[in-house]
Amino acid sequence: MRQSIGFALFYFLISGQVWAAASLPPDLKITIPNPPAEVEFGKEVAYQFLIENIGEDSSNDVSVAMGVSAEGSVVSAESAVGTCEALVFPQGTKVTCELGIVAPLVPITVRLVVKAPEVATTLQINASVSAQGENISTIGDNETSASTQVVAPPDSPVDDGGADDGGNAGADDDGAEAAGGQGGCSLHPGEEASRPGLFGLMLGALALGLLRLRARPMP
């Protein structure tokens, strides 16, 4: 009888140890799927943080800390569960979201919106997830970061074809006036061309008159 009880206790102890060894502890993970690569001057840019527990036990008192460099201004921070709070420091803004319990295979999304400055620079976003009072098996995936370039908006196209035509026409007029001043030509060449023809007719008539006088016999 004693041997049977001893074997039963031994079996339960061994099976409990095996079950404990097979069960994975909480393992939190945070990522930024498809972080924005760039944003224009003064525009808002959104970051989506995905928090997951890839272990087998629920994780308690989970919090997410996000840091925004001083170049950006935090517009809003929202979480699917829990609450978020932002604190502004000279070196940047720290946003903390308290998520509470994160169960396995139940991802939670945190959305952060930042306004870009009016100058070309880089927005640096850092984030980490932690759980107080828990021994997280791996910490390599508990942090993530993203960099977003702040760029100038593209220049608006300017239709200056009319200005070019007017400028060219003005230049042509100026060139014609300059040529007229230098060469003595008028802007109406047809009128000036008729003057040499009239002068030639007058000379011809005068020459004809002289010939007639010479050809007339003397009395």
Image (tube, rainbow, N blue to C red):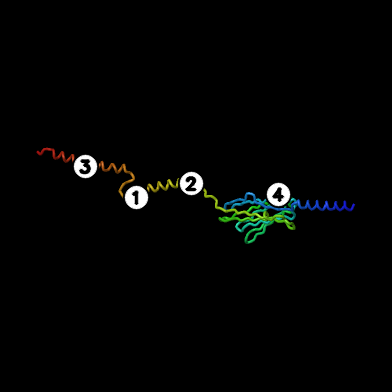
User: Residue 177 appears at what percent x and percent y?
Assistant: 35, 48
Residue that label 4 marks: 107
In this rendering, the label closer to the viewer, 1 or 2: 2
| Disc 1 from disc 2: Cα separation | 30 Å
Counting residues from the start of the chain, the first of labels 1 and 2 encountered is 2
Counting residues from the start of the chain, the first of labels 3 and 2 encountered is 2
In screen coordinates, is 164 left or right of 49?
A: left
Neighbours of disc 3 within 10 Å: few (<14), some (14-19), many (20+): few
| Tally of numbered discs | 4
Residue that label 1 marks: 178
User: Residue 55 appears at what percent x and percent y?
Assistant: 73, 51
Tag on residue 203? 3
Residue that label 2 marks: 159
In this rendering, the label closer to the viewer, 3 or 1: 1
In screen coordinates, is 10 left or right of 25?
A: right
Counting residues from the start of the chain, the first of labels 3 and 1 encountered is 1
Residue nearest the viewer, comparing 158 with 25: 25
> Which amino acid is tagged 1?
Ala
Tag on residue 27? none
